[in-house]
Image (cartoon, rainbow, N blue to C red):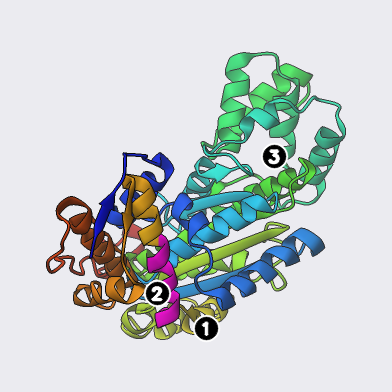
Amino acid sequence: MGNEKSAPDYNFEARHMIEALRSGVPSRAVGACFSEARPRIMRDVSGLLEQVCEHQKSCGKIISGRYGEGKTHLLNTVFNLAGASNMVVSYVSLSKEAPMDKLYLFYQKVIQNTYLPKRQQPGFMHEVENISANSPVANEMLLYAAKQLETDKLYYLLRSYLNTEDSDEKFILQSDMEGDFIANASLKKIYRRIFNQPAKYNVNFSKTKHCADYFKFMSHLFQQMGYHGWVILVDEAELMGRLSKKARLNAYRNMANFLLPEQFPEHCPESTCTLFALSSSYTEDVIEGKHEFENLEALFPDQPEPIRTVLNLLNDAEQLQPLTRNEINEVLVKIQDFHGQAYGWTPNLSVQTLAASTQSGGYLLRTKIRAAIEFLDQLYQYGKAGKTTVNELGMETFEEDVPAIEDI
């Protein structure tokens, strides 16, 4: 096989793509360029996004798959699809800093990783800063915060934010909207200073009880700003399996806010599509292995819902099937094309030859891709290639963290 090098004509976007694929770290750019894989599940997701955009109906879905089989890539593809549909997108991976059992911490990470359509960097507060006190958007949001939420704290917060001239106060109030919640007493003090009247909550706000109000408030705000909805993408949801027993059950209850909008409209954000991606071993390792249904009966015998429904949804989550040979070959053809663009050369390879180079890399899609790139690297550098050395690493574990005091 020839290695026909021409004068270097590097395409740095293509090189970025190859380096991202080589590292095995998914990216939104890769998701945009490899969006044809898994056409059936993408049709289903497109239908969910259309449901939000056209009918303002919230929805949720759980996707599971083996490690390295493309869950994160799928979420990145959805990210690009949603942005092209004029939807706000948030992308967060569950972690100790973004735990599903503590909704107020999860909210903070979601807001920190929220992107307006066609924006490369997260952030939207600059648009909130442009809302004037008596504008239609401001009036609608004040009415919504006063009447449609469990507590009216956000009414007093937003009204103060829109009317203060003090930059320090404005920063504190904005930080609260972003998840750095201020004390009720501090907000009441600010409100009294601005309006010379007390703020009287209908329900005393608690971040551990009323954080769903913030998700609902933001979803309504995005609509009023003219966006077609909000897409929340949650990766590595299998990390819930490392939480303590009670924390896991609380995490499932919080998931219901996003997965069961018709059953729990009082907590579900509006015009929002939420996708959770987790390992296909979660049912065996956690739900069955840690006896979640028995835990539910023991800890919440009188209030099994909505946790039981969420556990059933996790059990029935749609599985990402391995790509077919034709689908893998389509991916490999694109990789070969990007490699040529990235390094200014023309690989003279049949797709069968490139596919054969990936056989020693194991079954994972991720390692097949990396094996193909290593093969192309060797051809580019030396004009011939030996056996690739990529192997499979990084399988999940579900060991519990040290339990919280309240769980002992």
Q: Which residues are magenta?
A: 321-334
Q: Quadrant of the C terminus?
A: bottom left
Q: Quadrant of residue 200?
A: top right
Badge 3 element: helix
Residue at 44 percent of width and 55 percent of height: 30
Query: Residue 284 or 245: which is nearer the viewer?
Result: 284
Residue at 80 percent of width and 62 percent of height: 54
Badge 1 element: helix
Residue highlighted by disc 2? 328
Whether residue 291 appears in this view of the structure is yes
* Label of residue 155 in the image: none
Q: Position of residue 39 (x, y in %)?
A: 56, 74
How many badges with numbers are in the image?
A: 3
Outermost residue toward the top in this view: 166
Query: Residue 276 or 399: which is nearer the viewer?
Result: 276
Q: Earlier in the sequence, mark 1 or mark 2?
A: 1
Question: Could you give the CA–CA distance between mark 1 and mark 2, rounded to whole angstroms?
Answer: 32 Å
Q: Residues within 10 Å of mark 3 (few under 14, many from 20)?
A: many
Q: Earlier in the sequence, mark 3 or mark 1?
A: 3
Badge 2 element: helix
Q: Is residue 197 left or right of residue 157?
A: right
Whether residue 186 appears in this view of the structure is no
Question: Could you give the CA–CA distance between mark 3 and mark 1, rounded to whole angstroms?
Answer: 34 Å
Residue highlighted by disc 3? 154
Q: Position of residue 79 (x, y in %)?
A: 56, 55
Q: Which amino acid type corresponds to the residue marked 2 in the rendered image?
A: Ile
